[in-house]
Image (cartoon, rainbow, N blue to C red):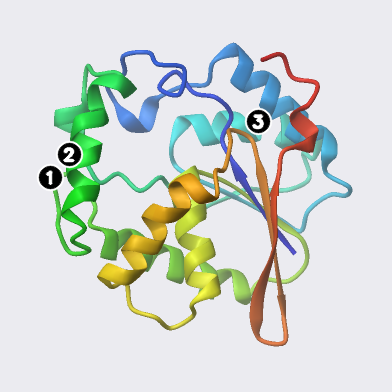
């Protein structure tokens, strides 16, 4: 069993102007959400994986404090950053929306926006690599990661072996609205019979967090 945990509410999610995409921190509400995630774990996990981005690592802090005997491992599960970081620096979510819309209108899996940006092919490849790695792990694992990376993992799990084509990219985009993954949501995966299965998106543990 694997839990994929999206990070708690970040400064960018709350609409603030941000600069270094990897260094965006949690808000106070995001920290409360992270604490709520730590409270619902039924047992000490066998392993914990971390994104390199600050907001995901901060989300993991309450959990790692609860289970100090688990040594986390750094994994390439950071967010799908498809816009060049230099273009995003000093902007808010609202200000980035035209750039986001332009990217998804293009619908080109191989397109790279420039230095520091990933193509969809690159990000999907990371998701496939993660699933191959996870299939070799035993026991119960938890990964603190990001919304779009979780979505890529789900697609790679549902369509194993399929190349990241325009059709796959279109499915990914459709899931952005069709399957929202809120801050601090938990997506459960399990491997059975050589295949991955998902239990959907769980947010019940966030009912007591102030809106």
- On the rendered image, what quadrant is the N terminus found in? bottom right
Q: Is residue 143 above or below residue 211?
A: below
Q: Is residue 67 above or below residue 3?
A: above
The 10 Å Cα crowd at callout 2, few under 14, some 14 to 19, many 20 or more, is: some
Of all residues shown, which one is farthest toward the left? Answer: 114
Task: Tell whether label 1 touches label 2 (CB within 8 Å).
Answer: yes
- The residue positioned 39% from the left and 81% from the top of the image is 162
Q: Position of residue 104 (x, y in %)?
A: 24, 49
Helix, strand or loop under label 1? loop
Q: Which residue is mark 2?
A: 84
Q: Earlier in the sequence, mark 2 or mark 1?
A: 2
Counting the numbered discs, the total is: 3
Q: Position of residue 91 (x, y in %)?
A: 24, 18
How far apart are the alpha carbons under marks 1 and 3?
A: 31 Å
| Label 3 vs label 2, nearer the camera | 2
| Label 1 vs label 3, nearer the camera | 1
In the image, is 125 to the left or to the right of 109? Answer: right
Of all residues shown, which one is farthest toward the bottom? Answer: 193
Q: Which residue is mark 3?
A: 61
Q: Quadrant of residue 140?
A: bottom right
In this view of the protein, can residue 3 be seen by the observer?
yes
Helix, strand or loop under label 3? helix
- The residue positioned 50% from the left and 62% from the top of the image is 153
Task: Tell whether label 2 touches label 3 (CB within 8 Å).
Answer: no
Q: Earlier in the sequence, mark 1 or mark 3?
A: 3
Front-most of residues 130 and 71:
130
Which label sits on residue 115? 1
- The residue positioned 26% from the left and 29% from the top of the image is 97
Q: Position of residue 92 (x, y in %)?
A: 30, 18
């Amino acid at each position: 069993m694997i839990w994929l945990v999206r990070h708690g509410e970040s400064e960018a999610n709350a609409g603030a102007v941000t600069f270094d995409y990897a260094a965006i921190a949690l808000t106070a509400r995001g920290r409360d959400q992270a604490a709520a995630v730590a409270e619902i774990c039924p047992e000490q996990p066998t392993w914990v994986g971390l994104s390199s981005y600050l907001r995901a690592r901060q989300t993991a802090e309450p959990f790692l404090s609860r289970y100090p005997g688990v040594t986390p491992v750094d994994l390439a599960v950071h967010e799908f950053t498809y816009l060049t970081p230099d273009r995003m620096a000093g902007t808010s979510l609202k200000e980035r929306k035209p750039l986001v819309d332009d990217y998804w209108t293009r619908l080109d899996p191989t397109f790279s926006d420039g230095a520091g940006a990933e193509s969809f092919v690159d990000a999907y490849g990371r998701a496939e690599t993660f699933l191959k790695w996870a299939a070799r792990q035993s026991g119960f694992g938890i990964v603190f990661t990001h919304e779009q990376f979780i979505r890529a993992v789900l697609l790679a799990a549902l369509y194993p072996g399929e190349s990241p084509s325009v059709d796959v990219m279109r499915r990914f985009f459709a899931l952005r609205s069709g399957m929202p993954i809120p801050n601090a949501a938990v997506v459960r995966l399990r491997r059975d019979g050589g295949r991955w299965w998902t239990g959907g998106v769980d947010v019940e543990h966030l009912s007591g967090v102030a809106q």
